[in-house]
Image (cartoon, rainbow, N blue to C red):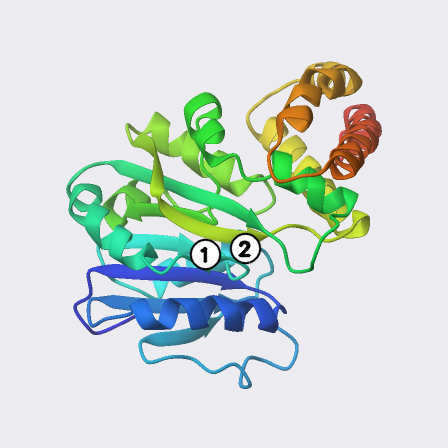
Amino acid sequence: MSATCNTIAVVIPHYDDRVRLRRCLEALAPQLGADVEVVVADNNTPGGLADVATPDGVRIAVESRRGAANARNRGVAETDAPVIAFLDSDCIPMPDWLTTVRGHAEEVGRSALVLGGRVDICFESPPPRSGAEAFERVFAFDQKGYVETKGFAVTANLVVSRETFARVGPFRDGVSEDVDWCHRARAAGADLRYAPDLAVDHPARADWPALKRKWRRLTAEGFALRQASGGSRLGWALRALAMPVSVLAHTPRVVAASGLGGGEKWRAFATLARLRTLRMMWMLNQAATGRP
């Protein structure tokens, strides 16, 4: 644990993605000051992180248990600042990100306030966009919608007081930890709010295999969370059968999406249909077997 008196602790979970971690830290470095401590909580990356330059004020802590939830919990334990800002290692904080955290710190520190910041999609390759990239441009990281309609915020860009975190408890591994933690926080009396001025960029998944891995994990974690909260397998099966219908319901979002050409919108729609069909199959198997 840090022995200094800081105002803000930035916790960055990481596993085996040195290129994006370097980019994240390079964007964060000019914003650091004596009031900030930063911990990269690494999930035992093969070969370690000795080749990753860490700016002054940034430390690396190793968490041997796999999973971003365990890494985030390690980062919290390694710090002592009263305000905790969670940032994912593949995100690029905007140049004013820490200034914005500082601006919210007093309110977060004196109240049970949880802030979910804006997460914008960026691209790591030139156009035209693949189906996965176009899909993520339309559907990924709708933080405002998550906060205002679903009652959670993704932990890629989340700010909370240490007092509130201690009252709610640590992230739980094996479930959708951001959904689970935010729902527990709200049940404990926390106020969840969207902060559009607190912004980071997140790269879109570049191709179908990467997008499929993401949603296979999210579907497994979603089923585990449903089981943990006492939801029925029949209800999960009914949700699965609604997946094809949801393709039509979400088609207007594809049509109205900005920044995509006609061919890219078609690829986004085709990826939406393909992914929802696959999720239906995964979910029906989960409902039938009881295994994530």
Q: Which residue is mark 2?
A: 68
Q: Nearer the viewer, residue 259 or 287?
A: 259
Residues at circles 1 and 2 in contact by the CB criterion of under 8 Å: yes
103 left or right of 86 in image: left
Residue at left offset 36%, top offset 61%: 95
Q: Secondary structure at mark 1?
A: helix
10 Å crowding of disc 1: few (<14), some (14-19), many (20+): many
- Residue 172 visible in this rendered orientation of the protein: no
Residue 63: x %, y % from top left:
51, 67
Q: Which residue is mark 1?
A: 72
To which quarter of the image does residue 112 belong?
top left
Residue 99: x %, y % from top left:
25, 57
Give the number of callouts: 2
Q: Judge whether 286 appears above or below 19 on screen.
A: above
Q: Secondary structure at mark 2?
A: helix
To which quarter of the image does residue 51 belong?
bottom right
Q: Amino acid at mark 1?
A: Arg
Q: Nearer the viewer, residue 263 or 81?
A: 263
Q: Judge whether 54 appears above or below 107 on screen.
A: below
Q: Amino acid at mark 2?
A: Ala
Residue 5: x %, y % from top left:
16, 68
Q: Judge whether 208 appears above or below 248 on screen.
A: below
- Residue 289 visible in this rendered orientation of the protein: yes
Residue at left offset 38%, top offset 79%: 55
